[in-house]
Amino acid sequence: MGRRSAKDTAKLIDEVARGDRLLEDIKDPQLRETVRLALRLHKDPYTAPDARTRSRIRARVLFGLHPHNATLVDRLAIAFELLGRPTPYAMRALAVGLVIVAVGASTAVVSSGTVADDALYSVKTTSEQMRLALATSPEDRAVVELSIAEHRLAEATALATLGDEDNAIVATSEYGEHMANAAAELAQVETLQPETATLVVQLQQRIDEHRATAAAVVARLADDPNRASAAAALSAVAARGAPAAGLSPAAAIAQDAADTADEAASLAERMAIPAPTTDAPPSSSGADRDVTPPTGKATPRGGEAASSDSARGQNERVSKKERAAESARKAADEAKASAKKAKEGSRRTPSPTPRHR
């Protein structure tokens, strides 16, 4: 009998299992035994051992094992595996942090040139307050205050050029406030630290430059009737006040800056006073009162509507000027407080006594 293939054997097993062929009809005894075993395995499938048997086998296998201690290579592999797990998360956090820093820095740079009523102006003022919070020494705070004051002067110049007199006055008053703050910081250590005197001289030089810049802007805008009133706000910066007697250089600068802020606030308060309106007196003639249109139609009320719109616009302008006056006065009060602080600080810091050899 020829050699059967596995396919033929499987076909023969299927025929016997279906009953198409009897097991006794298979002549080859070896093949008949193979089919018989296959049918028996099919009828009696293998069953896994019970839980007790599995536990006994597991205990026997583990008892025969002899594990070795962890080597240096094993420990290094475990260490690198543990260190490698949080790396993707750390890189993601670092990337997100860099994106946030980049966006914040770009926003701060863009907002540096903004003026009042701009969308990013609050970002600018917030960054300025953060810089002040990070400054630790009086000299550092004075430098930051000077930088903020120069920003306010640039804003006042830009606003005056645009004809925005209200915000220009507020920016001018805030310029005086921050200049007074810078001088007050230097006045605290003016006589205790000799190097502070150099900073005071440099501060006075910057103020002289500010006055020259403001005077040039005032001269340029004075001939324009639409921007002359806005240029008047910078006149407080351009004017040089009388030197105060009995004050240290830093305290004198603070007092001069407070006077500048107060002058700008006074200008804002004068502009906030509404101008008196003159209405035409009603006619007392009886003929004028009894005159009616010959056509019998009602008199158009366009004049009354225009008058109402004009009054509403006047009220809005007055309200805006009042808010500007309040902001300017608040800055002026802060400048006065800084000037007072500078005077007290200069008195509390006596000059060091010279040493006699």
Image: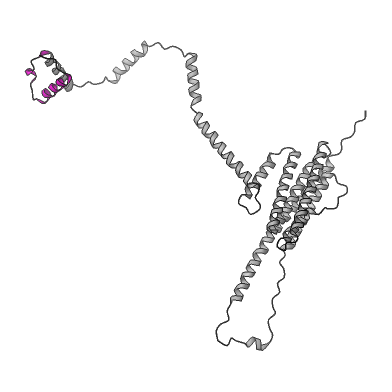
Horizontal side of 263 relative to 304 (left or right) equals right
What residue sits 54% from the left and 37% below the top?
Answer: 96
Residue 42, located in which quarter of the rendered image? top left
- Colour style of the rendered protein structure: one colour
What residue sits 77% from the left and 49% below the top?
Answer: 210
Residue 271 lies, in percent from the top left, at 73, 62
By secondary structure, the bulk of the magenta-drawn segment is best described as helix
Residue 63 lies, in percent from the top left, at 37, 12
Residue 140 lies, in percent from the top left, at 74, 39
Residue 5 lies, in percent from the top left, at 16, 18
Tell me, yes or no, whether the highlighted magenta stretch contains residue 6: yes
Residue 27, located in which quarter of the rendered image? top left
Q: Which image quarter holds the C terminus?
A: top right
Residue 155 seen anywhere in this rendered image of the structure: yes
Residue 336 seen anywhere in this rendered image of the structure: no
* Image label count: 0
Q: Residue furthest left?
A: 25
Q: Which image quarter holds the N terminus?
A: top left
What residue sits 8% from the left and 17% below the top?
Answer: 26
Asked whether 39 or 288 is in front, the reply is 288
Tell me, yes or no, whether the highlighted magenta stretch contains residue 225: no
Q: Which residues are magenta?
A: 3-29
Q: Residue furthest bottom?
A: 287
Horizontal side of 105 relative to 3 (left or right) equals right
Q: Residue furthest right?
A: 357
- As drawn, 64 above or below 44: above
